[in-house]
């Protein structure tokens, strides 16, 4: 009986993880279903909740459709923390909500990340990069532009490019996610278009003559970039 009573004093957490500070010390009364002894957070794996835009959601839906019935195929996700360069932490998408938020045009998703070294702590803010599913061709070529070149006309996004005769030509765009500080262009631009990124405040109307000059820092990368110019 004494051994049984002693066993009743032992409290085991239902999950493995890291315990917080002790909320009750020796000598305090602990009551069943009322007293909180401590909090335990699970650290391996960890889950990252984020809101994805409509284009990302549709791409993930297509990826799920294309890989249906193919075991072992995951939808990879990369995660970066505030002090990280890039997205060094790898995981996979394991949940997508069943509806979009009509007010924001986003859908809630969740990524699952292994965390054996306990570097990721619950509550941290993170940056998330969705990637193509394994077996679907890996990286794809796309067009990236400087996000500061994108202008807004009510609900439409557009940019100016250098048209024939050095005149400002408006292009309405369909945009995707941010990649390494640049915006993905899904539709509206082609490789080789000269994008106006500077002096936009001096373009008063489409067709206005401009004097384009190459913008500094227009380097090459593994994906296509629209050449940048500044309007003078």
Image (cartoon, rainbow, N blue to C red):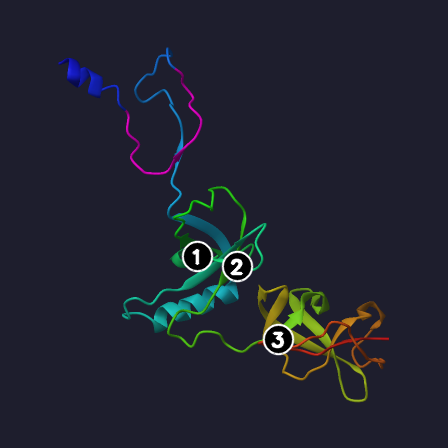
Q: Main secondary structure of the magenta part?
A: loop
- Picture residue at 80% right of the left edge, 83% below the top: 167
Q: Which residue is mark 3?
A: 221
Tell me residue 37's x, y (percent). Answer: 38, 23
- Picture residue at 77% right of the left edge, 88% below the top: 164
Q: Considering the numbered disc 1 on the image, is that residue within a helix, a strand or a loop?
A: loop
Residue 161 visible, this angle: yes
Q: Which residue is mark 2?
A: 87
Magenta stretch bounds: 11-25
In the rendered image, the vertical position of residue 2 relative to residue 17, given as above or below: above
Left or right: where 55 falls relative to 92? right
Quarter of the image with the C terminus in it:
bottom right
- Picture residue at 69% right of the left edge, 82% below the top: 193
Q: Considering the numbered disc 3 on the image, is that residue within a helix, a strand or a loop?
A: loop
> What numbered label is drawn on residue 99?
1
Point out the frontmost of discs 3 and 1: 3
- Picture residue at 43% right of the left edge, 21% below the top: 23
In the rendered image, the vertical position of residue 123 relative to residue 230, given as above or below: above
Tell me residue 150's x, y (percent). Answer: 69, 68
How dense is the environment of label 3, judged by Cα within 10 Å: few (below 14), some, or many (20 and up)?
Answer: few
Tell me residue 43's x, y (percent). Answer: 40, 43
């Amino acid at each position: 009986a004494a051994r049984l009573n002693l066993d009743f004093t032992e409290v085991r957490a239902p999950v493995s993880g890291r315990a917080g500070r002790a909320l009750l010390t020796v000598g305090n009364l602990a009551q069943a279903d009322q007293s909180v002894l401590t909090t335990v957070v699970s650290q391996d794996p960890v889950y990252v909740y984020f809101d994805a835009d409509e284009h990302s959601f549709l791409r993930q839906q297509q990826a799920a459709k294309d890989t249906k019935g193919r075991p072992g195929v995951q939808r990879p996700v990369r995660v970066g923390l505030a002090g990280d360069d890039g997205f060094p932490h790898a995981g996979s998408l394991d949940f997508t909500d069943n509806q979009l938020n009509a007010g924001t045009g986003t859908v809630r998703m969740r990524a699952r990340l292994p965390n054996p070294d306990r570097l990721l702590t619950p509550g941290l803010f993170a940056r998330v990069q969705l990637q193509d599913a394994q077996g679907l061709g890996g990286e794809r070529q796309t067009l990236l532009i400087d996000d500061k070149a994108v202008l807004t006309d009510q609900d439409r996004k557009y940019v100016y490019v250098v048209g024939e005769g050095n005149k400002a030509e408006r292009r309405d765009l369909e945009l995707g996610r941010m990649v390494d500080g640049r915006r993905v262009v899904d539709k509206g631009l082609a490789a080789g278009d000269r994008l106006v990124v500077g002096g936009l405040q001096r373009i008063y109307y489409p067709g206005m003559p401009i004097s384009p000059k190459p913008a500094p820092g227009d380097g090459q990368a593994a994906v296509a970039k629209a050449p940048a110019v500044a309007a003078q």
